[in-house]
Image: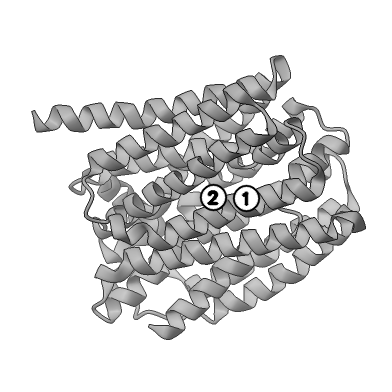
Amino acid sequence: MRRLLLSAGALRFLDAFVLIGPFYTVMFAERGLTPAQIGVVLAAWSGMCVVLEVPCGVLADRFSRRWLMSVAQLMRCVGFGVWLAFPGFWGFLVGLMLWGMKSATLSGAFEAAVFDELKAHGREVEYVRVFGRTQAARFAGVLAGALGAGAAAPLGYDVLIGASIAVGVAAAGAALALPKAPRLTATHRGGYFAHLRRGAAEAARLPGVPGLLIFIAGMQAVASSLADYWQLFARDVGLPKPAIALFIAALSGVGAVAAAQAHRLRALPMKALYVMLTAAGLAVVAAALTYRVWSVGFLLVYGAILWLVDTNVDARFQHALRPETRATVASVKGFANQCGTSLLMLNFGLIAQGSSYQAAFLGYGVLLAALGAGYASWAATRRT
């Protein structure tokens, strides 16, 4: 258990410790990309996840999850190298596509590796606590990376990218340090497409899974499409670069605390979690309507609520899955998430191009609140 906590936490920390992270959309804008072009390159990142999410989940059910996650980290390092060599639209596009390959590989494989290791020791009930701690480690990585980026910002973007490559190599090593859970024989039965069909069928038929899958995918799609634009929100309201990094650090800090404490809410009914997501969306609406330096306070409230909800609903999703197709079904969720994220990222850029970033933030806050309110109403109807 100790090895799992240390190695999984180290992987998530190093995976998120990306010094260019607080600035890359600002870097895109400063190097000449229009809002629409920024939307295109971000959508390309998510588009790679759409294409590869489910195949990577199947591979993670059939081959070494540790090696897959290690190679994925190195792919992102190559993408950062492309940014250094070709700092323009096409270079940024290719680099983010390689980043998307990393994300697609990591998502389902990591969740499944952690859950199956716990299940092998009869401790799967602790998944929400362990997963919350790994989420906290990820946010701690973002926090540390943001603080480091703020201090190193005067050195320029190339230095930040080079440091991110070095950390990526360390993350590849951390993936190999994960314990190897006993592999179920059923995982290797049947061919690639048969396994994929089984995972997709279970995602649609397992009790409670379809509704959770759609909710999580929708919530994470909106949150993911917003995440890469918070830097531009901070720039627009007047924060200088070091303060932008501190804002990203603060946003990650509240997320880390929320994820680590999320297990305390595991007894809440789903309706309460839906209402909480509605409140998170309304916090984004408030930030967009006011659009001042102090408006970032609303976004800190948003981040805390979002990760309390996300960690709890993800744990409930994992408990509803079968071990032999866990990574595949988790990747079906990721596939749905990334389909929505790709469209929303591109659409955000188009709205900002045609109107303003403020209008785009407002619209997406309303969308998130509507998702939570819709599910809350549906849950209330089911009980009557």
**Which residue is at 77% across, 34% downward?**
238
Q: Secondary structure at mark 1?
A: helix
Sequence order check: which comes first, mark 2 or mark 1? 2
Q: Position of residue 227 (x, y in %)?
A: 60, 42
Left or right: 360 in relation to 107: right
Picture disc at residue 253: none
What is the image's colouring? one colour
State yes or no: discs 2 and 1 in contact (Cβ < 8 Å): yes
Percent of width and height locating residue 356: 70, 19
Left or right of 371: which side holds 10? right
Q: Is residue 228 above or below residue 365?
A: below
* Residue 191 visible (yes or no): no
Residue at (77%, 58%) from the top-left corner?
149
User: Closer to the camera: disc 2 or disc 1?
Assistant: 1
Is residue 211 visible to us here? Answer: yes
* Amino acid on which disc 2 is placed: Leu
Query: What's the residue type where badge 1 is placed?
Result: Gly
Residue 100: mark:
1
Quadrant of the image containing the N terminus: bottom left
- Please name the residue shown 70% across and 15% down the image: 354
Q: Position of residue 98 (x, y in %)?
A: 68, 53
In the image: residue 26, left or right of residue 190: right
Instruction: State the residue lying farthest toward the top.
Output: 354
Lateral position of residue 315 relative to residue 180, left or right: left
Residue pointed to by mark 2: 52
Query: How busy is the neighbourhood of tag 2: few (under 14 within 10 Å), some, or many (20 plus)?
Result: many
Q: Nearer the viewer, residue 192 or 64?
A: 64
Q: The residue tagged with tag 2: helix, strand or loop?
A: helix
Point out residue 122 in the picture as x, y percentages from the top left corner: 23, 78
Residue 133, image quadrant:
bottom left
- 103 lies above or below 361: below
